[in-house]
Amino acid sequence: MDTLDAKKQEIDEEIQVNKVMLYMKGNRMAPQCGFSAQVIQILNHLGVAYETRDVLSDPELREAIKQYSDWPTIPQLYVNQEFIGGCDIVTELFENGELEEIVAA
């Protein structure tokens, strides 16, 4: 198994164990980009428990998550093992009230 496959398996395990999982640049205390910061702000506002992984500290993870989701940008939010989307989609779902329903389910 190559490193990328191993990382994808790691991702698979993380989204199974954590109901809400965010792959982002930086961490919840120190987001390293505005889009990651915005998603953190939304999750904190909703008051849900969530885990994060910093893709900047792990280039292989950064590449693997893009392949895993077939989505080119970071951050990426997973809820109940389902890929929700990046910052724009998460923001839109939050604004129309759907994200709250998704994380409550």
Image (spheres, rainbow, N blue to C red):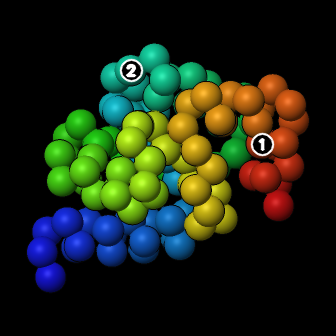
Within 10 angstroms of label 2, few (less than 14), some, or many (20 or more) residues? few
Of pointers 1 and 2, the one earlier in the residue sequence? 2
Amino acid type of disc 2? Cys
Within 10 angstroms of label 1, few (less than 14), some, or many (20 or more) residues? many
Q: Which residue is rendered at x = 28% and y = 58% of the image?
A: 64
Relative to residue 8, is residue 104 depicted above or below? above
Observer-nearest residue: 82 or 52? 82
Instruction: Answer with left or right where residue 61 lies relative to residue 13.
Output: left
Instruction: Answer with left or right where residue 28 lies relative to residue 103.
Output: left
Q: Quadrant of the N terminus?
A: bottom left
Q: Which residue is rendered at x = 33% and y = 74% of the image?
A: 9
| Residue to which mark 2 is pinned | 33
| Quarter of the figure with residue 65 | bottom left
Amino acid type of disc 1? Leu
Q: Which residue is rendered at x = 44% and y = 48% of the image?
A: 71
Residue farthest to the top? 34
| Residue to which mark 1 is pinned | 99
Observer-nearest residue: 11 or 17? 11
On the question of residue 95 being in view, the answer is yes
Q: In which quarter of the image is the C terminus?
A: bottom right
Relative to residue 5, is residue 95 depicted above or below? above
**What is the x, y in percent for residue 89?**
65, 35
